Amino acid sequence: MTKKMKTGDIAIRVNDVDKSFKVYFDKANTLKERLLFLGRNGHENREVLSDISLTIKKGETVALIGVNGSGKSTLLKLMTKIIYPDKGTIETYGKLVSLLELGAGFHPDFSGRENIYFNASIFGLSKKEIDDRIDDIIAFSELKDYIDNPVRTYSSGMYMRLAFSIAINVDADILLIDEILAVGDQHFQDRCYEKMMDLKRQGKTMVFVTHSMDAVRKYCDRAVWIYQGRIKKDGPTNEVVDEYLKMCS
Amino acid sequence: MNIFKRLHDYREFLRTSIKKEIRGKYKKSFLGILWSFLNPLLMLMVYAIIFPIILKSPEKNYVMFLMVALIPWNFFTTAITQGTGTVIVNGGILKKVYFPREILPISIVTSALINFLISCIIVFVFLIFTGIGFSIYFVFFPLIVLIEYIFLLGIVFILSSITVYLRDLEHIIGVIIMVLFYGTPIVYSLNTIPSNLLWIFKLNPMAYIVQGYRDILYYQTMPDVSGLFFIFVLSLILLIVGYHIFNKLQKNFAEEL
């Protein structure tokens, strides 16, 4: 079915992707060590993902589920181009924002406002685009007057709220979200979900990695179960989650 | 080519990185960006006091003779030493978010360029004060700056990416820079070199560049145009090759760091 789909409808296409990491026993980083241990450079390749093929349509909300270490986060990292596959291709269509690590690149000495500019620019926004959004970002973060204080004075909750507000306001076509639903208190979490549902209605594509099956059932149209680096089951949320929970118990 | 499109998309990030590089250098210091003026000024004053005492140079104005070469040399060393480590220093953010990795070396070399141009203001002021002044050959100044910038960008692309895999490079570079300092006509003039040793300078691109600055600013003569053109072409090749090396190696940055 994936072959017949028009390119215009596709947000992410993953083709036969393999990925393995080098696991060094004792990493030889210096020239001396490299020369000394030439030929017995101790590493093994650990396969993290193999034969992954996945097509995600525009506007879909997809959950990646699976036990720890099954390769979900690696797959998300591949989609953001932080790392590259050993084999196969990954294509993404449209502006992509990953909420893998919130607040990456925050500079503790700069104020919240300055960090909005810096962090949003990492997502590829121009100054004007940030100017247009800054009020929304500050309002969503509920930081109010604290926004002009240095970020190092923030509590961890405030820090995450600011980071999340920036990422969610970037206006991306595709959002990759890795276990960030532990952001802030109940009130803020509710607003995060609300905002994400809002984005979903606007036709944004979202890929979640989460262990909260309640959230998966509630918000996702489709679930992909990854088991030991391979796709075990891919289909409507409830079917996949039921089977996954059966195996876990 | 899509590198230009990528850089255009991320121009705000490039701009803030350069700004952070310049401002971050003097962050929390009392005088801030003024240090970019003060550093060369104080250096000049120290030399002006010391050299007339310890060194009898045939040069009329040894301090200016030295400064017009030393300031471009400092541009070279700052860009190279900071550029070599830039990918490693930014490892944390590199592992977390995607952005065009080229921005890291580009922002280092560009912020070094801006610092260099600020220092040049001091040099120009003193050129006027000491009565040396400017000549028509000053028109070559932007061209030589451009050549040095392209040359550095090419080298930094190569060094910053290879250092990720071979950390010793940072230390090796320190030694090479020290040797190169004496292999470049900075503290001495090319005229004092025995002619059977001149071939060494023909192999050193920085010798052409530094001599170029000295010709137009201090001696106020025509620079070695064919030599500089040769370095310009070499720098362009270096930039293209360097970018390809960087691009090939950057795919594994997140895993190696």
Image (cartoon, coloured by chain):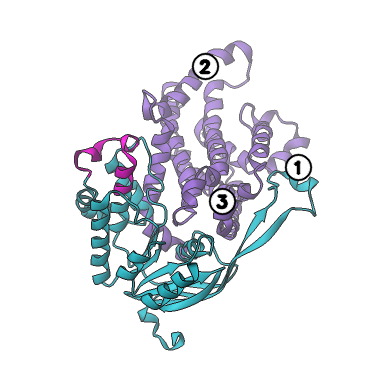
Identify which residue, A174 or B194, lies in the foreground.
A174
The kind of residue on which mark 3 rests is: Phe
* Whole-number angstrom distance, CA of label 3 to CA of label 1: 24 Å
Vertically, is A182 above or below B126? Answer: below
* Whole-number angstrom distance, CA of label 2 to CA of label 1: 41 Å
Subunit ID for the residue under disc 1: A
Q: Report which colour depicts chain B.
A: purple
Q: Residue at the spot x=49%, y=54% of the render?
A: B101
Q: Nearer the viewer, mark 2 or mark 1?
A: 1
Q: Which residue is mark 2?
A: B46
Subunit ID for the residue under disc 3: B
Badge 2 marks a residue whose secondary structure is helix
Residue B234 is at least partly visible in this image: yes
Task: Please identify the residue farthest to the front as the structure is shown.
Answer: A249
Q: Residue at the spot x=38%, y=52% of the render?
A: A122
Are both tags, 3 and 2, on one chain?
A: yes
Identify which residue, B1 or A30, lies in the foreground.
A30
Number of the label disc, if any, that sits on residue B157: 3
Q: Which residue is mark 1?
A: A32
Left or right relative to A25: residue B73: left
Residue A134: image x %, image y %? 23, 50
Quadrant location of residue B29?
A: top left
- Residue range highlighted in magenta: A143-162
Residue B56: image x %, image y %? 64, 15
Residue B125 is at least partly visible in this image: no
Quadrant location of residue A212?
A: bottom left
Structural crowding at the residue carrying mark 2, measured as other residues with C-alpha within 10 Å and reported as few (<14), some (14–19) or many (≥20): few
Residue B184: image x %, image y %? 65, 34
Left or right relative to B142: residue B206: right
Look at the numbered discs 2 and 1 and tell me whether their residues touch, using CB distance below 8 Å.
Answer: no
Q: Report which colour depicts chain A.
A: cyan
